[in-house]
Amino acid sequence: MPTSEVSTKLGFRKLTARIGAEVTGAGPGLELAAEEVAAVRSALNEHKALVFRDVSIDDNGQQRFARYFGELTTAHPTIPGEPGAPHVLPVDSEDGRANHWHTDVTFIVTPPQLSTLRSITVPPYGGETLIANSATAYRDLPGPLRDFAGTLWAVHTNDYDYAVPPEDLDPARRQRRKVFTSTVYETVHPVVRVHPLTGERGLFIGGFVQRIVGLSNGESRDILRLLQAYVTRPENVLRWRWEPGQLVLFDNRITQHYAIDNYDVLPRRLHRVTVAGDLPVGITGSPSYSLRGDASHYTPAVPGRAG
């Protein structure tokens, strides 16, 4: 149901026409009653990304909030979590800068359904996060291209130079990449994914895609570049400027995001907690499938509709 039909103390103010809303009335501890969780879920289905200001929670509080929406994953399939908080992944500029468009952990067969990001250290300028609506991107496609995209499947992997070539990495970041690819995952997902709660179709691509099934690398790059250009159209993108005490919740099944590297050598740190997801399906109902790598230690299998 539309968020306006759910009666709670929460308010939702749109940030752009196509993506994003600010949530008011949640309180600094983000402690929600059941009807408020339902209102947030409804708003997330509508707006794809929700922003909470004036938040005062620690890692335990962030994990508690994320659990309102389902069982948690661990921090990452290959990267260790925050000490004492195995579900919390530190996103720290000292460990690298994720300045590429991506959807979280699509290289496994059941990527997270939701991601939460909480500001820990923010630079005095720059460091925004861009979040794109891949459903409106799909709807923007011309009819023939939309039909073509619905027939495609793509191989996603963590062993891919999606950001920086290995030869350009310093020793510390080369070691981090070695950890990141310590277990190699390859998964085939539909290029057009059907959202399990709303039935919306969205482009399910991003930086972990290596190639299109059945096409050469060169052909794949050309097609992916064309489709990705629709995802990142300014009309589809929320540009969020971080401040202390903020949390952003976004639907990982129907968005992409990008951390802008525009803050010089200043520190920037967020903490991420993700909610376990279901098996993606394409427009014909066929599900994703794994080619390589077992992620059962990272995420439980969520049957059917996660939500």
Image (spheres, rainbow, N blue to C red):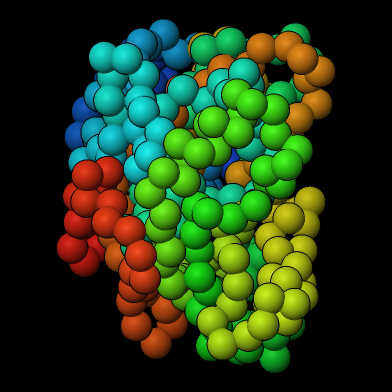
Q: Which residue corresponds to the image point at 66% horizontal and 12% vertical from the top-left?
A: 267
Is 22 located above or below residue 70 in the figure? above
Q: Nearer the viewer, residue 265 or 131?
A: 265
Whole-percent x and y of residue 77?
Answer: 35, 43
Q: Nearer the viewer, residue 54 or 233?
A: 233
* Quarter occupied by residue 67: top left
Quarter of the rendering occupied by the N terminus: bottom left
- Is residue 212 visible from the viewing direction of this image? yes
- Is residue 46 visible from the viewing direction of this image? no
Q: Which residue corresponds to the image point at 20% horizontal and 56% vertical from the top-left?
A: 301
* Quarter occupied by residue 122: top right
Is 305 located above or below residue 298 in the figure? below
Q: Nearer the viewer, residue 242 or 160?
A: 160
Q: Which residue corresponds to the image point at 24% horizontal and 62% vertical from the top-left?
A: 305
Total count of labels: 0
Q: Does residue 39 appear to the left or right of 137 in the view shown?
A: left
Whole-percent x and y of residue 56?
Answer: 41, 8
Whole-percent x and y of residue 31?
Answer: 28, 20
Q: Does residue 266 appear to the left or right of 2 in the view shown?
A: right
Whole-percent x and y of residue 203?
Answer: 57, 68
Q: Nearer the viewer, residue 266 or 174?
A: 174
Q: Which residue corresponds to the image point at 73% horizontal and 71% vertical from the top-left?
A: 221
Is 269 located above or below residue 37 in the figure? above
Is 196 located above or below residue 45 in the figure? below
Q: Does residue 120 appear to the left or right of 290 in the view shown?
A: right
